[in-house]
Amino acid sequence: MRILLALITVFSVFQAQAYCLIKGVDIQSDFTAKEIPIDLNAGDQEITQPISLPSNSINTFICEDTSPQLNKFTLIAGQGNAEYYLIEQEKHKLYVKISLEQDSSFDSGIFPPEKTIDHHANELNNLKYKLKYSVQSNYTGNLAGTITANTSKKLNNYIMIKPAECAANQCSIGSNINQKYTYYVTIRPTFTPTTCTFKNQTITVASISYQDIDTNSFVVPNPQPSLQCSSSTGVATSNITYRFQSITPPSHGVLVNELGINSGSAGEVGFELKNKDKAITFAPDQKFTIADFGNVVENNKIIPLDLKVRYARYGDHVVTGNVQSKVKVVVDYD
């Protein structure tokens, strides 16, 4: 019984395991892929990309001349967690989540167990990986970095291409446990900023009598004017606000009558405006929020204003007639 146990022990220690060994890793083993354009307007995306290692790499590899069962390589992400980046385009920006994953439907194949054959790194190019990305709303976590839109950026995360591991006490030509080809992924992100527009719109306020000028109440105009937002990414790429700007200087906060005191005009009577129950002062710093940066904004969303109007005199020359005023709605991106 003792002899049998001893024989089994010796057999276990000296049993060779098939494996591959990268040569020249102290010289060069890092590679950077050609840039991948990513369109952040396209929504959540998953792109399958092939590895593209060069054929003239110094880092060849050999495989042990025993059973070929494990003579293969595996692709894994260097960092298991997804990364978050801030993409900037002048005043506009957004957060994007990016991850790298193995595409398990592709493998390296099994290499012949012949250690006299130098294999080049490009023989591993049938391996593929997945690049996943998605625009984030209201992200508040840590960032892996900031990228200027439409410029190349090498991700912090990377791909490792590792041979099946074999420790030094198991493999005759040395350990390969710490060996790998490192493959860096470069992206070029683009997106269309979220914008909102106010097209020319005419609103009508019901007529009142001369006697009611000083006592008439604020009313909702018909129709209520509105903005329309274009949001290809689905989020606000800035703090979006709007403000009111008078075409002609207001008189004590009242929009003047553009018809003046000409025939058919009501004279020196114009309009006072409120928006969201605040008196409109026409000051450039009086802004109303459409969406804060990072908020969800539906594409082609219609956003009604909360406007109210009343007649108001700004002089003594008031007669029966028409009142016409103009105001500009300005959208700002901060």
Image (cartoon, grey):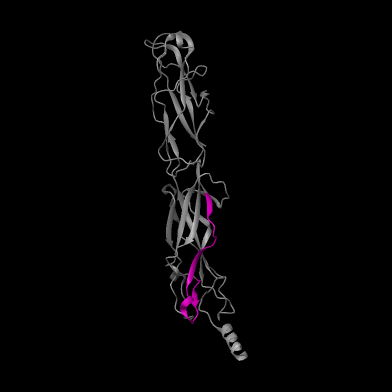
Q: Is residue 148 above or below residue 227?
A: below
Q: Quadrant of residue 323?
A: top left
Percent of width and height locating residue 98: 50, 54
Residue positioned most to the right: 2
Q: Does the magenta-highlighted stretch encompass residue 84? A: yes
Q: Residue at x 52, y 79 (%)?
A: 17
Q: Quadrant of residue 11?
A: bottom right
Q: Is residue 55 above or below residue 297?
A: below
Q: Nearer the viewer, residue 53 or 103?
A: 103
Percent of width and height locating residue 317: 45, 8
Residue 140 at least partly seen? yes
Percent of width and height locating residue 100: 49, 59
Q: Nearer the viewer, residue 20 or 132?
A: 132
Residue positioned most to the left: 264
Percent of width and height locating residue 164: 51, 73
Q: Nearer the viewer, residue 197 or 69?
A: 69
Q: Is residue 224 above or below residue 24?
A: above
Q: Does the magenta-highlighted stretch encompass residue 134? A: no
Q: Residue at x 46, y 55 (%)?
A: 132
- Magenta part of the protein: which range? 58-85
Quadrant assignment for the N terminus = bottom right
Across the whole image, how many numbered discs are drawn on residues?
0
Residue positioned most to the front: 1
Q: Residue at x 42, y 57 (%)?
A: 47
Residue 55 at least partly seen? no
